[in-house]
């Protein structure tokens, strides 16, 4: 039985790379094909999806909104992404189930921990949507929580940069790319890996985090297989 991982995909993984908004079928299909390949090799992959390509609770679009209401809207956005990814994965040959933390029974299963584990054991991809089901928690925290619940060996965070840098590489040409960090280094240096709740949860449950560039073909496969790519936090 292959190792079990949680792959965290932000809304950027679904969006048109130029517009950074909406759902781009070409982008989603590319991601799905890579995931389907490693699942065919026997790896167990569960996915936590974000929704920022459609609506983000902390965005300017939500300015003035009640925070809880905006977060629930963001949760529903993740369900849309999850359904798009399930469709692409099924077409790529990977049997897939979507489980949601809020009840959307006409289109997805409710999140049930033991059922999710059984799906993974049977070689199905499981997509966790709607975050934790609670406002004020990020999908990064959801990834850490689900990893602990289903016994994942690692959280793989796909981003638009090559890993964790000492500062923003977009504005600082001297930004240093780290190969490896400890949880406390991430927290103390306030590095932008995941939010502090997610980092703390991974640290307390001894779950490593790998941050890598989603845009580079083959990186998902490398990360799932446990090969060296991006930055590892442990």
Image: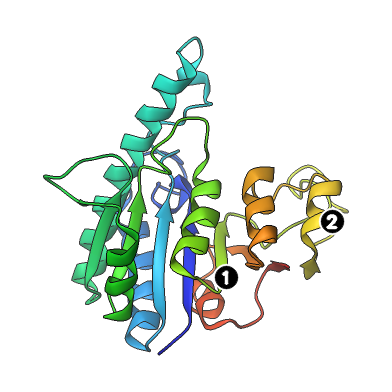
Report the residue that reaches farthest toward the top: 64
Q: Could you say which disc has been placed on residue 154 in the image?
A: 1
Q: In terms of secondary structure, where does tag 1 sit?
A: strand
Viewer-nearest residue: 49 or 21:
49
Question: How far from the left and from the top, in percent, is residue 70?
Answer: 42, 23
Q: Are marks 2 and 1 in contact (CB under 8 Å)?
A: no
Quadrant (top left/top right/bottom left/bottom right) for the C terminus: bottom right
Label 2 Cα neighbours within 10 Å, binned few <14 / some 14-19 / many ≥20: few
Q: Looking at the image, can residue 39 be seen?
A: yes
Point 33% across, 74% down: residue: 120
Q: Is residue 17 left or right of residue 40?
A: right
For marks 2 and 1, the one nearer the N-term is 1
Report the coloring of the rendering.
rainbow
Measured in 3D between alpha carbons, the distance from the residue under mark 2 to the one under mark 1, in whole angstroms, is 18 Å
Residue 81's place in the image compared with 88, above or below, is above
Q: Could you say which disc has been placed on residue 185 in the image?
A: 2
Picture quadrant where residue 119 is located:
bottom left
Question: How far from the left and from the top, in percent, is residue 155?
Answer: 56, 65
């Amino acid at each position: 039985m292959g190792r079990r991982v949680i792959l965290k995909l932000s809304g950027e993984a679904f969006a048109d790379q130029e517009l950074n908004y909406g759902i781009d079928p070409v982008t989603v299909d590319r991601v799905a094909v890579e995931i389907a390949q490693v699942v065919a090799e026997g790896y167990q992959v569960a996915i936590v999806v974000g929704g920022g390509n459609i609506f983000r609770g902390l965005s300017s679009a939500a300015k003035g909104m009640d925070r809880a209401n905006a977060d629930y809207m963001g949760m529903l956005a993740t369900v849309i992404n999850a359904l798009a990814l399930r469709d692409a994965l099924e077409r790529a040959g990977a049997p897939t189930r979507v489980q949601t933390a809020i009840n959307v029974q006409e289109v997805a299963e409710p999140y049930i921990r033991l059922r999710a584990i059984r799906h993974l054991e049977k070689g199905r991809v499981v997509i966790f949507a709607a975050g934790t089901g609670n406002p004020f928690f990020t999908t990064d925290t959801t990834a850490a929580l689900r990893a602990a619940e289903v016994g994942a060996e690692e959280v793989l965070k796909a981003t638009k940069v090559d890993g964790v840098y000492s500062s923003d590489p977009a504005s600082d040409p001297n930004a240093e790319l780290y190969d490896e960090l400890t949880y406390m280094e991430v927290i103390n240096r306030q590095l932008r890996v995941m939010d502090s709740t997610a980092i703390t949860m991974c640290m307390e449950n001894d779950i490593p985090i790998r941050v890598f560039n989603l845009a580079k073909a083959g990186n998902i496969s490398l990360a799932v297989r446990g090969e060296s790519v991006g930055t590892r936090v442990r």
